[in-house]
Image: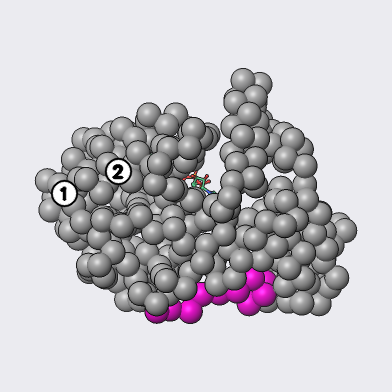
């Protein structure tokens, strides 16, 4: 692996990969539909940014020219037409095959099992994984179950700040293997360098599976606060997310609401839970140190940010 193209580098997941690749000394290119103005703080000194759109096959040969490895990040199939995402992948594979790309590492961005489950977000990713792994290009799919960064997103942060409450749509008994975006990026680099990972769908999580109260306690220890956990009703969560992601479309809101409700019920009720990963086998095969919730929280204290903001 020498020259890596990150597709979807403008999102938080892709940005973490650009940063990690830069830190590991790789030459990095990024593809974006709007590359102008993209910058990568903490990333490599020089990033080749190229305009490209997966739905426009004519531009893809230029994006993959001279690239030996592609890190692929895709938008959500809950919020975008799934058939367009699939078509975009076919377009990419066509260009990558002609250009002689030697490796693709796909960040599925979520848990993907080995069979369809009837939820578009999952089943679209599964179809993409089948497409990639049967393309003839050596490929690996990394399926991170849930990002630690979610803990500080718009849907969780206000309740943390206002009442020291981790208000999250998980049942209180659900063990959750939170993983950082930086660790997902490091895993992608690790498996990209390893032939054993070719053809694999690797479900990955963080180093511990914590229940709600345990996650809240880890955050509390890092932030020096008494943080408690409350299980957020799924209806309320689905409602808030629908308004966040489709502010101007009643039809969009109702589709997202129904979709999230079904998928979060499944996340909460399925046994074993898709959010719980035992990483011991993975780590035996790919030794590395993963970041715990408490370690990550020490570096990301929202109360410190509020305090600093208030004093400026
Ligand atoms: N497991 C978890 O905890 C968790 C948490 C959050 C999100 N997710 C999942 O992560 C996935 C991505 O979500 P997100 O909100 O990060 O996505 P996003 O920001 O909407 O999109 C990710 C990237 O896709 C690129 N993209 C979109 N359409 C493209 C096209 N036609 N051609 C080329 N690039 C295109 C965008 O690049 P440009 O705009 O620069 O072209 C963007 O950087 C979703 O499946 C979501 O469900 C999972």
Secondary-structure class at tag 2? helix
On the rendered structure, is 123 left or right of 222? left
Label annotation for residue 130: 2
Which residue is at 30% across, 50% downward?
50
Q: Furthest-front residue in view?
A: 271
Front residue (pair 33, 144):
144
Q: Quadrant of residue 236?
A: top right
- Residue 139, percent across and down? 26, 55
Which residue is at 67% across, 56% downward?
174
Q: How crowded is mark 2: few (under 14 residues within 10 Å), some or many (20 or more)?
A: some
Front residue (pair 198, 224):
198
Front residue (pair 75, 29):
75
Q: Name the residue under label 1.
A: 136
On the rendered structure, is 46 left or right of 217? left
Task: Name above or below for residue 237 compared with residue 280.
Answer: above
Which residue is at 25% across, 60% downward?
198
Q: Quadrant of residue 4?
A: bottom left
Magenta segment: 287-297
Q: In which quarter of the image is residue 190?
A: bottom left
- Residue 97, percent across and down? 15, 47
Q: Quadrant of the C terminus?
A: bottom right
Count of picture labels: 2
Is residue 174 inside the magenta stretch? no
Which residue is at 31% across, 57% downward?
200
């Amino acid at each position: 692996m020498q020259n890596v193209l990150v597709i979807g580098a403008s999102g938080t997941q892709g940005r973490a990969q650009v940063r990690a690749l830069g830190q590991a000394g790789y030459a990095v290119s990024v593809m974006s539909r709007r590359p102008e103005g993209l910058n990568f703080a903490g990333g490599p000194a020089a990033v080749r940014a190229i305009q490209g759109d997966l739905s426009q096959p004519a531009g893809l040969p230029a994006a993959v020219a001279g690239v030996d490895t592609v890190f692929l990040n895709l938008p959500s199939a809950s919020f975008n037409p799934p058939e367009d995402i699939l078509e975009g992948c076919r377009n990419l594979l066509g260009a990558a095959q002609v250009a002689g790309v030697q490796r693709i590492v796909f960040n599925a961005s979520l848990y993907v099992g080995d069979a369809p489950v009837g939820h578009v977000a999952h089943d679209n990713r599964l179809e993409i994984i089948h497409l990639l792994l049967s393309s003839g290009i050596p490929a690996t799919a990394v399926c991170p179950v849930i990002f630690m960064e979610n803990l500080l997103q718009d849907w969780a942060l206000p309740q943390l700040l206002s009442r020291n409450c981790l208000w999250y749509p998980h049942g209180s008994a659900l063990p959750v293997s939170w993983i950082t975006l930086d660790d997902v990026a490091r895993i992608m680099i690790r498996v990209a360098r390893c032939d054993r990972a070719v053809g694999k769908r690797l479900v990955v999580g963080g180093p511990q599976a914590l229940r709600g109260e345990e996650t809240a306690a880890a955050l509390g220890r890092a932030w020096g606060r008494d943080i408690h956990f409350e299980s957020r009703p799924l209806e309320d969560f689905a409602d808030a997310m629908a308004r966040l992601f489709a502010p101007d479309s009643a039809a969009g809101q109702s589709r997202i609401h129904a979709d999230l409700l079904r998928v979060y019920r499944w996340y909460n009720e399925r046994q074993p839970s898709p959010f719980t990963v035992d990483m011991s086998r993975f780590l035996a095969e790919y030794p590395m140190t993963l970041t715990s919730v408490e370690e990550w929280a020490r570096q990301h204290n929202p109360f410190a940010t509020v305090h600093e903001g208030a004093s400026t």
